[in-house]
Amino acid sequence: MIGDEPERWRYLDLGRQGPYENGATMPVLVRSVAEHGTPIAQTSVWGQTHLNVGWFDDVDATLDLDRCRELGVEVVRRQVYGGGTAFYGAECAAMWGFMLPKGDDRYRDLDALITRFQPIVHDALDALGLGAVRFEGSSDLRWQGRKLGALTAQDVVVCNSVGGFVNLARPDLDLYLQVVRIPDDKFKDKAVKDLREYVCTAEEVAGHPVTYEQFRDALLAALATAGIELEPSTLTEGERYGLSKISAKIGSDEALRRVSSVRFATSAPAGCAIGFGNHKGRKLCRAGVALDADGVIVAAMMAGDMHVGPPDVIDRVAAALTGAKADDRDDLRSRIAGVFEAPDVHQADDAMGVTTEDLLRAVDKAITDARQQPMTTASSSADH
């Protein structure tokens, strides 16, 4: 039986990666897991300062792209992987990822994966003098209310993925604050409200510098103790070819504006009132609606900081809202639930994830905002 077989994983030390290389590596490795059925573990450290936009995130709500270009800060959108927009300084964050085949019963359940790998991450942190760090919910690694890193699990269609990051050193937050737009209620549920204070580093917690190599070795040792045998390898020729094809796409304007409130507003039909709303439940949800003169939703956009699969689910929620009467809340809820509560939708730790009600409340706020806006004309542009 599969469950009785020893766990042997392929392992890649990807070392220092730029954002384009890293963003392309993940889809390539996911495809390899799907094709060969062998789990893959990888570790890396950011080699270039950049901004990393989550798959579902509204880029215009979180970043000033013009300012990023002016200051020379690279921006990419993660492919398929959710979460919020993150700022990574060179050498400041260690990353890890486990790509796991769904065909193996040991890796099928997202909640079980989180439960299994949390203690392994704890063991690695403890070996580095970071034993005081604790998980809050299923994801955030925090110390005294401050965020050190995260561990997440996500269904990425052809396999399940578990991964995370740990802040090794403090990035240039002054640079970040010149380009960031922090959404409403982003820190609503945080004990520490100031971004500069909210982020902490391994060096602060341990009282001494922690390098990528030290973190990597501690994580590999913790995996070995847990009975996972790692076989070191490098990228194959085919994987390197795939990497070169994908890396050229993830920083394109098309990729960055995959979810964009500016694009949504400027592409909405003339004669509509456009509104946006954020709701912070356990995760930040964002909605945009275009209402016609009869109060019918003629276009909708959904976005947010979330880890949910499959990767088109939030787009499908938005599409389901088209044609709904804005004042029929029961119908709005039913349309959202019809997509978001379907059997094919998965997220780890439902108790800490996004709910139908969270999405609905974001839509409610967008509708309220739209009713306060003038009707657009063909030449209208967004100012939200």
Image (tube, helix red, strand yellow):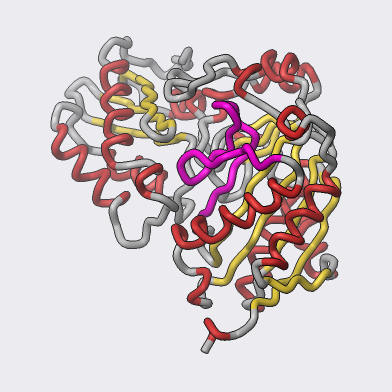
Residue at the bottom extreme, as displayed: 1
Relative vertical location of residue 332 with respect to residue 157 in this rendering, above or below: above
Relative vertical location of residue 242 with respect to residue 18 in this rendering, above or below: below
- Would you say 151 lies left or right of 95 here? left
Query: Can you give x and y, in whole percent of width and height, for residue 273 in the image?
Result: 31, 18
Q: Is residue 148 magenta?
A: yes
Residue 266 in view, yes or no: yes
Image: magenta residue range: 130-155
Task: Return the residue nearer the eye: 195 or 205.
Answer: 205
Majority secondary structure of magenta residues: strand
Q: Residue drawn 17% across and 32% down?
A: 325
The image quarter in which residue 271 lies: top left
Query: Can you give x and y, in whole percent of width and height, for residue 137 in the image?
Result: 46, 41
Q: Residue drawn 48% across and 24% down?
A: 190
The mark tally for this picture is: 0
Query: Can you give x and y, in whole percent of width and height, for residue 16 in the image?
Result: 85, 46
The image quarter in which residue 27 lies: bottom right
Q: Residue drawn 77% across and 54% down?
A: 218
Residue 254 in view, yes or no: no
Relative vertical location of residue 331 with respect to residue 377 in this rendering, above or below: below
Query: Can you give x and y, in whole percent of width and height, for residue 58 in the image?
Result: 51, 31
Q: Is residue 103 magenta?
A: no
